[in-house]
Image (tube, grey):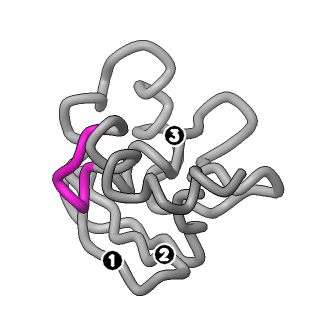
């Protein structure tokens, strides 16, 4: 399993800093999402700064906006899911 996001903090210019249970951490630029679709809500009442980890472990801003923490983790690691899976194949071989 991919590590669990344990901490998230909003940064300037639509970036977030995320820490994971295995020690991986870093910032991710989400500026490419700003002002598009549901993400336009980030500008309402400074919503972007209110990021949190929800009850389902997603990186969230409200009931309408969340991002899969696994995709952020892989981005921080610079891996595709297939690359990550191959690196962790021993973990899955026993299942």
Residue 82 versus residue 90 in the image, above or below: above
Residue 3 visible in the picture: yes
Residue 44 versus residue 89 in the image, above or below: above
Rendering coords of residue 36 (x, y %): 33, 17
**Nearest to viewer (mark 2 / mark 3):** 2
Q: Secondary structure at mark 3?
A: strand
For label 2, the crowd category at 10 Å Cα-Cα, with few meaning under 14, some 14 to 19 and many 20 or more, is some
* Left or right: 3 as drawn, with respect to 27: right
Residue 80's tag is none
Q: Are marks 1 and 2 in contact (CB under 8 Å)?
A: yes
Residue 20's tag is 2
On the rendered image, what quadrant is the N terminus found in? Answer: bottom right
Q: Secondary structure at mark 2?
A: strand
Q: CA distance from mark 3 to mark 1?
A: 16 Å
Instruction: Determine the residue positioned at 22% across, 63% down.
Output: 12
Instruction: Give the magenta range.
Output: 75-80
Instruction: Determine the residue positioned at 29% across, 31% down.
Output: 34
User: Which residue position is annotated with label 1?
Assistant: 25
Q: Quadrant of residue 28?
A: bottom left
Residue 22 versus residue 60 in the image, above or below: below
Rendering coords of residue 40 (x, y %): 41, 25
Rendering coords of residue 30 (x, y %): 26, 43
- Looking at the image, is mark 3 or mark 1 earlier in the sequence? 1
**Nearest to viewer (mark 3 / mark 1):** 1
Q: CA distance from mark 2 to mark 3?
A: 15 Å
Q: CA distance from mark 1 to mark 2?
A: 6 Å
User: Which residue position is annotated with label 3?
Assistant: 67
Question: Which residue lies most toward the right here?
Answer: 55
- Looking at the image, is mark 1 or mark 2 earlier in the sequence? 2
Rendering coords of residue 81 (x, y %): 36, 38
- Looking at the image, is mark 2 or mark 3 earlier in the sequence? 2
């Amino acid at each position: 399993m991919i590590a669990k996001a344990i901490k998230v903090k909003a940064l300037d210019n639509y970036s977030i800093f995320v820490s994971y249970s295995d020690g991986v951490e870093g910032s991710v630029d989400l500026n490419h999402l700003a002002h598009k679709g549901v993400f336009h809500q980030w500008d309402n009442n400074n919503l972007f700064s209110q990021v949190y980890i929800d009850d389902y472990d997603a990186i969230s801003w409200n009931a309408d906006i969340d991002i899969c923490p696994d995709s952020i983790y892989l981005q921080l690691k610079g891996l595709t899911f297939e690359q990550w899976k191959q690196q962790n194949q021993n973990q899955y071989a026993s299942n």
